[in-house]
Every structure is written in C-alpha cells, then in structure tokens.
Image: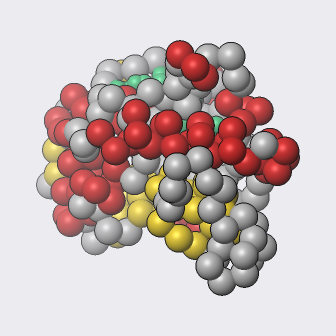
Amino acid sequence: MLTLKKTDRIVVLTGAGISAESGIPTFRDAMEGLWSEFDPEELATLSAFKRNPKLVLDWYEWRIKAFVDKAIPNPAHQTLVKWEEYFENFTLITQNVDGLHIKAGNKNVIEFHGNIKRMKCLGHNHKFAWVRKGEEIPLCSVCNSMLRPDVVFFNEMIDPNNLQAANKAVRNCDVFFAIGTSGMVYPAAGYLEEAQILGAKTYVVNTEHHFPASKRDSTVFLRGKAGEILPKIALS
Ligand code: OAD
C-alpha cells in the first residue's frame, strides 16, 4: 500500500464525493422533492439571485437544514485532520461548501467555493453567519444591500486570495491528491494536471473514473470510497 513521507509537501483537493459518506448528496444529486423541477445551474447564479432572491435563499436554506446541519465528518475527513498534524507542509483545498473539514478539525482549509453557512452583501462583500428570519431577504447591517449566500455562483471568479494560495501550494507540492471530485469545474479541475506536469506524484481517490484519460497518464487511481481508502494510506 501507498506510504507517504513526513517531509513530502502534500496538496489535497476535495470535492463532493468526500462528503457523500456523511450523507450530503453531491451538487448534481441534490435536487429532490420540491426542488426536482429546478436546474441547480439556474439557481446558483447571480442573475437568478437578483431575479428571485427568495427562491435562491430558500434553496440554499433547504440544503443547510436537510443535509449540512445534520452531517458529521466521516473517516476520510478525520484522516485529513491527521495528515495536517503529521506533515510539515500540507494544504487542503476544498470545493465543498459544507464546512465539514473545519468541523472535523482541519485548521488551514482553502474553501475554494465558499461556505454555505455564511452570507455576504451584494454591495461590498461584508460577511455574516447565515442569518435569516422566516422568509425575509436579509439586509447588510453595514450598507443595507441584500445578503446572498457566500458561495461561488456559476460564472463567478474565485476569491483572489484563495486562488493565489491554492496556485502557490499546487506549484510547490511533491504529492497531489484529488479526492471525490469529478474534475469538471475549473479552475480547481486543472490542478491535477498542473501538479503532474510540474513533477508531483498524483493520486485520484474516487468510486469511478471521472478525470479524462489524458490527465491520468502517470496518475495513480485509487478506486473506492474515500472513507475506506484514506485511512489505509500509511505515513512514515
Ligand atoms: P461532483 O458531484 O461533480 O463529483 C463527485 C465525485 O465524487 C464523483 O466523481 C463521484 O464518482 C465521486 N464520489 C462519490 N462518492 C464517493 C466516495 N464515497 N468516495 C470517493 N469518491 C466519491 O462534485 P465536485 O467534483 O465536487 O461548484 O463538483 C465540483 C463543483 O461543481 C462543486 O464544487 C460545485 C459544482 O458545480 C460550485 O458550486 C461552484
């Protein structure tokens, strides 16, 4: 089995698959019941929010109450807490907005696509914990503009600080893991190939082959559930 060295500079990119074993459906699976008639790509946009803020806030609030608030970290999240404590140089980049890595105990997490439990204002990006009474559209207590979920909507830019930190880590790593991500949404999806081109050892942990074949040339594919694979990886 694979063994990682304490001095390896490690970057881990996670996606929705790592939270699947905690009961959170992936982004594309999450449309159920009342919401099944909506396309998430039409709800998770700035124009949808401006057109109908109540609908978009209702959808995010449903995801928080139905899944995120009930979820507890699984053995994959717990393994990454041990990795952060063990390695001298460890960076965790997550595309997930569920906050489960932080709940598990990871401290340095780049929340690449934001956090579903936060809001920010349209005017100046003032940030708040999720605050909503009933069906109201909450307003910023500083500038009075509407509050939206603090997540990256489709077609929006990644926060420049997060992008810079993630780019720097990927360009300087020895070992790169892509865990539970389909590798379809850029720029995060480009990191595996970039790390590989720059000479890092690259690993994919996934229940299915999802990264396109051209990217897998020297990538080691560890097939299975993240919660079962990660605890078996040895540290030396
Ligand atoms: P996806 O839903 O696209 O992919 C989830 C991946 O996890 C798939 O490749 C599954 O095969 C895999 N998977 C499922 N269960 C697993 C398990 N137990 N262990 C390991 N792998 C498992 O999710 P992401 O790649 O995270 O963006 O999607 C990326 C982005 O697309 C999201 O962050 C979101 C979405 O649009 C924004 O909202 C901006």
| Quadrant of the snapshot with the C terminus | bottom left
The residue at 47%/66% (across/down) is: 129
* Residue found at the far bottom of this picture: 142
Q: Position of residue 54 (x, y in %)?
A: 69, 44
Q: Colour mode?
A: secondary structure
Q: Position of residue 11 (x, y in %)?
A: 43, 56
Q: Position of residue 175 (x, y in %)?
A: 41, 52
In this rendered view, identify the residue nearer to me: 88 or 33: 33
Count of numbered badges drawn on the protein = 0
Residue 213 in view: yes
Q: Quarter-wise, where is residue 157 in the image? A: bottom right
The residue at 53%/57% (across/down) is: 132
| Quadrant of the snapshot with the N terminus | top left
From the viewer's perspective, is residue 173 above or below residue 190? below
From the viewer's perspective, is residue 148 above or below residue 28? below
In this rendered view, identify the residue nearer to me: 52 or 100: 52
Q: Position of residue 7 (x, y in %)?
A: 28, 66
204 to the left or right of 185: left
87 to the left or right of 186: left
In this rendered view, identify the residue nearer to me: 117 or 183: 117
Residue 181 in view: no
Q: Quarter-wise, where is residue 189 in the image? A: top right
In this rendered view, identify the residue nearer to me: 177 or 69: 69
Q: Quarter-wise, where is residue 123 in the image? A: bottom right
The residue at 53%/70% (across/down) is: 128
